[in-house]
Image (spheres, rainbow, N blue to C red):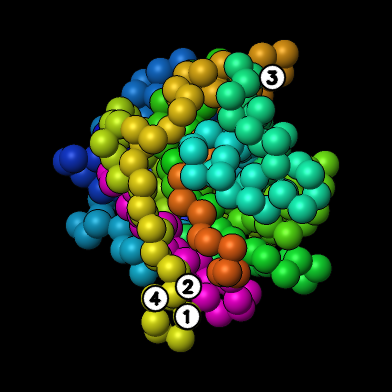
Amino acid sequence: MIKIYRDHDDYVLENLERIIRVQEFSLDALFQANSPADYLTPFFESAHSEVIHQSPSEKHPWQAPVENQEIWAAGVTYMRSKSARMEESEQSGGDHFYDLVYEAKRPELFFKSTGSRARGHLAPVRIRKDSAWNVPEPELTLALNSAGNIFGYTIGNDMSSRSIEGENPLYLPQAKIYRGSCAIGPCLVVGDVVSPNSKISISISRLSQIVFQGDTSVSQLKRSFHELADYLFQENEFPCGAYLMTGTGIVPDAGFTLQSGDQIQIQIEGLGILENEVE
């Protein structure tokens, strides 16, 4: 297992034996490598790598671990997500639509963000000013190399405007893709560190009081990682690889909406904690 943190001017790499700071590192090259180990090992063996004696701090504002990777997302992959989408779309008559998506052979996949738009750990995320119902969506996120193979994982926050999506399913891009709508981090973890029992949890605080919390496990995901990855790469190409958010199994009830100043903490076992404040 290797953790990769992106700082402003360089990267911090951590394995079980060493923590190093490197400048001549490229996420694009890692995502293009046939073997991540072959690309990463020389950095730990190099005499030019700066050795660090403290683990990366959760209080440090790490940038999103992304360069030229596109960020995509899968929808309606958990029963709770299906129920929430049907609930928000009932008045518009779109509730049956999400029932069909959940049962269909082909998953729902949609573009979420470019690397330049993605926010990192402790960076602010946003809610749309033209939406009255906004929620975060905590999602296990796959790192896929340019050949479509899964080689790592990170934490994703798929910020969503439920009022806009509920008005009409065709408004999904506006509900999902806007400035500050995507956060990933705090690091990219390379290795087989996720199991069906891995817990995904979220906590939202307002004025230092918890106003929502919930958890689920990877075992509740309806579709396999490889199924989602295979569909993403069908008739498509990603020269610098891609991230794929796998959907959410935690959605607040209809009475809850995010407010400016809320603190969102998403934790996935083995991957750390991604924290963002709502602007």
Which kind of residue does numbered mark 2 sit on?
Answer: Gln
Label located before the other in sequence (2 or 4): 4
Residue at 36% across, 69% down: 59
CA distance for labels 2 and 4: 9 Å
Q: Secondary structure at mark 3?
A: loop
Judge from the rendering whether residue 273 lies leftward or rightward of residue 32; answer left or right. Answer: left
Which kind of residue does numbered mark 4 sit on?
Answer: Ile
CA distance for labels 3 and 2: 36 Å
CA distance for labels 4 and 3: 42 Å
Which kind of residue does numbered mark 3 sit on?
Answer: Glu
Label located before the other in sequence (4 or 3): 4
Residue position for label 4: 210
> Are the residues at dot 1 and dot 2 in contact (C-beta closer than 8 Å)?
yes
Q: Which mark is residue 82?
A: none
Q: Which mark is residue 206?
A: 1
Q: Which residues are drawn in magenta?
A: 258-279
Residue at 28% across, 31% down: 195
- How crowded is the residue under tag 3: few (<14 C-alpha within 10 Å), some, or many (20+)? few
Residue at 53% across, 34% down: 77
